[in-house]
Image (cartoon, grey):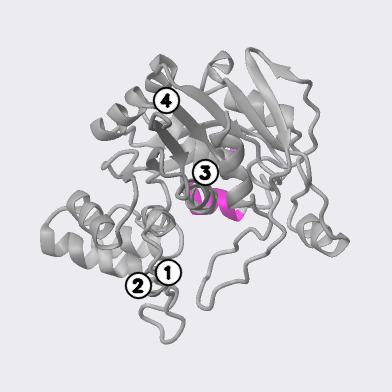
C-alpha cells in the first residue's frame, strides 16, 4: 500500500480546475488547493462591490473539480444564469456561497460547508481572507489596476512586459494555507496565466518564503500559450525568467512541458488575432537544479463558451488525466 502524499496546488481559475479534476482520481493523494483571491472580473466584481465578499469563482471551480461525482450537483454549481439583467453571467455556485456566507456570518465557514455538501475529496483554501487588488507595472511605467483589466490587455501595453506585480493593499498568507504548504510533499504551481494566477499568489506576503522553506518537491507546469498583456511573445525561458523574480529558481524541482503542441491552423489564426501563440520550448534538459519533463499534455477537446459567460475563456487546455498522471509519477 502506497504512503499517502500531500499535494498542494497553488493557482486559480481554469488551470487549477483542470489539474484538480485529474488528481481527484488518485485515492492515495491528500489534495489541497490554494486559490488566488485577486479575481475582480465578471461575477467576482459583483461579489466584491455589492456583497463585500472575496471572489469565489476560483474557489467554486476547485470545489466542483474535487466534488463527489454527483453529476446533477456539479452541474447545478456550474450553472450560469444567462437571462435577464440582474444576475445574468452569475453562477448558481457563487450565489449559493454568497448566501451561505451571509447566513453563517463567515465566508470561511461557507467554503467549508459547501465542500461538505458536495463531498469534496480534499481541502480548498483561499490564499488569504484579506481583500486586495493586483497592480501590474509595464516597461513604459504604465500601471494597470485589477486582475480583470490586466487580463483585458489594454492595447497600450499589450505587447509590453510586466516588470513588477504587487497587491494593493499588501495581504498576508492565511495560516491554514501556510500550514498546508509547510506539510506538503508536492507543491504544484500552475497551470494558469503566469501573472494573474501563479505570480498573483507568490506576491502575497509569506507565500514565496513558505514555499522556499518547505521540504516539498516543487513543480512548475509550463503554459501552453502566451498571451497579450501578460506574456506576449514569450518562450518557455521567458516564463521561467519572470517566475524567478518572485520565487528563487533553484527552488524548482521539476518543470513539466507538453511535447504535443500542434494546433489547427484555424485555431492558431484565432489566437494570433488575440495576440497569443504557442509557447516555444527553448529550454535544455535542466534549469538550475530542476529536471525538465516533456510529455504529451495537450487536451484535444475544446469546451464551448457557456451561455451568459461574459469573460473570454481559453480553448487550449491541458488534459486533466495526462497532467495528473505526469505529476503523480514524479
Which residue is tagged 3? 196
Question: Residue 202 placed where, x, y %?
Answer: 45, 30
Magenta residues, as a range?
Answer: 142-152
Which comes sooner in the sequence, label 4 or label 2? 2
User: In the rendered structure, does residue 269 fall within the stretch colored magenta?
Assistant: no
Which residue is tagged 4? 185
Q: Nearer the viewer, mark 3 or mark 4?
A: 4
Quadrant (top left/top right/bottom left/bottom right) for the N terminus: top left
Question: Residue 175 placed where, x, y %?
Answer: 24, 31
| Tally of numbered discs | 4
Q: Is residue 210 above or below residue 300?
A: above
Q: Nearer the viewer, mark 1 or mark 3?
A: 1
Q: Nearer the viewer, residue 62 or 25?
A: 25
Which residue is tagged 2? 92
Q: Which mark is residue 203?
A: none
Q: Nearer the viewer, mark 4 or mark 2?
A: 4
Q: Is residue 299 visible?
A: yes
Secondary structure under tag 4 reads loop
- The alpha-carbon separation of the residues under discs 1 and 4 comes to 31 Å
For label 4, the crowd category at 10 Å Cα-Cα, with few meaning under 14, some 14 to 19 and many 20 or more, is some
Amino acid at each position: 500500500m502506497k504512503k499517502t502524499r500531500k499535494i498542494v496546488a497553488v493557482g486559480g481559475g481554469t488551470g487549477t480546475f483542470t489539474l484538480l479534476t485529474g488528481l481527484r482520481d488518485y485515492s492515495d493523494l491528500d489534495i489541497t488547493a490554494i486559490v488566488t483571491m485577486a479575481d475582480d472580473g465578471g461575477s467576482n466584481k459583483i461579489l466584491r462591490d455589492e456583497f463585500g465578499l472575496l471572489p469565489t469563482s476560483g474557489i467554486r471551480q476547485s470545489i466542483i473539480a474535487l466534488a463527489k461525482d454527483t453529476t446533477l450537483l456539479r452541474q447545478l454549481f456550474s450553472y450560469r444564469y444567462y437571462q435577464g439583467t440582474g444576475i445574468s453571467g452569475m453562477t448558481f455556485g457563487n450565489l449559493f456561497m454568497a448566501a451561505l456566507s451571509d447566513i453563517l456570518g463567515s465566508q470561511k465557514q461557507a467554503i467549508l460547508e459547501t465542500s461538505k455538501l458536495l463531498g469534496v475529496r480534499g481541502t480548498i483554501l483561499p490564499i488569504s481572507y484579506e481583500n486586495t487588488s493586483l497592480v501590474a507595472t509595464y516597461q513604459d511605467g504604465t500601471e494597470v489596476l485589477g486582475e480583470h483589466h490586466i487580463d483585458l490587455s489594454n492595447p497600450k501595453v499589450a505587447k509590453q512586459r510586466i516588470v513588477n506585480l504587487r497587491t494593493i493593499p499588501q495581504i498576508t498568507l492565511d495560516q491554514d494555507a501556510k500550514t498546508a504548504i509547510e506539510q506538503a510533499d508536492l507543491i504544484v504551481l500552475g497551470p494558469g496565466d503566469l501573472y494573474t494566477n501563479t505570480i498573483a499568489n507568490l506576491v502575497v506576503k509569506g507565500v514565496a518564503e513558505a514555499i522556499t522553506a518547505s521540504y516539498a518537491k516543487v513543480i512548475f507546469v509550463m503554459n501552453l500559450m502566451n498571451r497579450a498583456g501578460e506574456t506576449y511573445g514569450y518562450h518557455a525561458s521567458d516564463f521561467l525568467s519572470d517566475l524567478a523574480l518572485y520565487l528563487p529558481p533553484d527552488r524548482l524541482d521539476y518543470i513539466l512541458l507538453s511535447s504535443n503542441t500542434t494546433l489547427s491552423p484555424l485555431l492558431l489564426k484565432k489566437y494570433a488575432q488575440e495576440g497569443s501563440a504557442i509557447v516555444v520550448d527553448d529550454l535544455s534538459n535542466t534549469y538550475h537544479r530542476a529536471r525538465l519533463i516533456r510529455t504529451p499534455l495537450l487536451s484535444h477537446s475544446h469546451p464551448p463558451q457557456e451561455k451568459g459567460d461574459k469573460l473570454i475563456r481559453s480553448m487550449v487546455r491541458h488534459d486533466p488525466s495526462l497532467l495528473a498522471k505526469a505529476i503523480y509519477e514524479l
